[in-house]
Image (cartoon, helix red, strand yellow):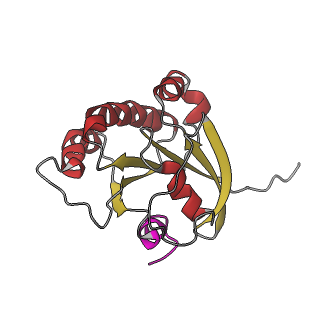
Amino acid sequence: MDHVENEEQPIKLVIMGMENAGKTTILDVLTGKIRETPNKPPSMNPTKGVERSTILFFQKETKVWDLGGQETYRNEYLSNPEKYFHTISFFFYVVDIQDYYRLVPSVMYFKGIFNLIKKYSPDAKLIFLFHKTDPDYIPDDRNLKSKFLEKIEPGLKLANTLYIKYDTTIFDIKSIKIAFGLES
């Protein structure tokens, strides 16, 4: 009888959200491409499709999938879920809390993704990054963080799904590292 060792499943971390939410910039902090807090947001090109990389996450090599947020790509992910949503260990959803006009599309997109994650990766840990909580950001009556959570929490409760949330900004690199367990 052949002895097969019980290999540990590799960690798969997926980061998604609408275009221009800051997903790639967040990953640039984690991979060391951005090491110091910038004076202004870096100029970035949109992610085309899926960009894969590897980072050290909780002292383990982790495969990271950065899924571009443009509408064409969002439709692709939702129409081919078996290709994108299998074996996710950690799912980070990034919300640009300064983009009022994308709140409703972001909520709808998350709801579609959430159902697929529950189907293909039911044990995935769910983390929300409320990004662009910049030093000069003052939440007004349109507080997008609260409005986003109001719209998605009923579905999360119904599915008995716990989540973690963090406020992050490129102007405080530590806020990003804390969200990924790299600093306390």
- Asked whether residue 130 is in view, the answer is yes
Q: Residue at x 48, y 26 (%)?
A: 78
6 or 15, which is in the foreground?
A: 15
| Residue 151 rendering spot, x and y as whole percentages | 21, 39
166 or 9, which is in the foreground?
A: 166
Q: Quick check: 179 left or right of 2?
A: left
> Magenta span covers which residues?
173-184
Residue placed farthest to the left in the image?
Answer: 141
148 or 171, which is in the foreground?
A: 171
Q: Quick check: 180 left or right of 48?
A: left
Q: Quick check: 85 left or right of 104?
A: right
* Location of residue 110 with respect to 130 vertically, above or below: above
| Residue 15 rendering spot, x and y as whole percentages | 50, 47
Residue placed farthest to the bottom in the image?
Answer: 184
* Location of residue 94 with respect to 19 vertically, above or below: below
Residue 44 lies in magenta, yes or no? no
* Location of residue 86 with respect to 77 vertically, above or below: below
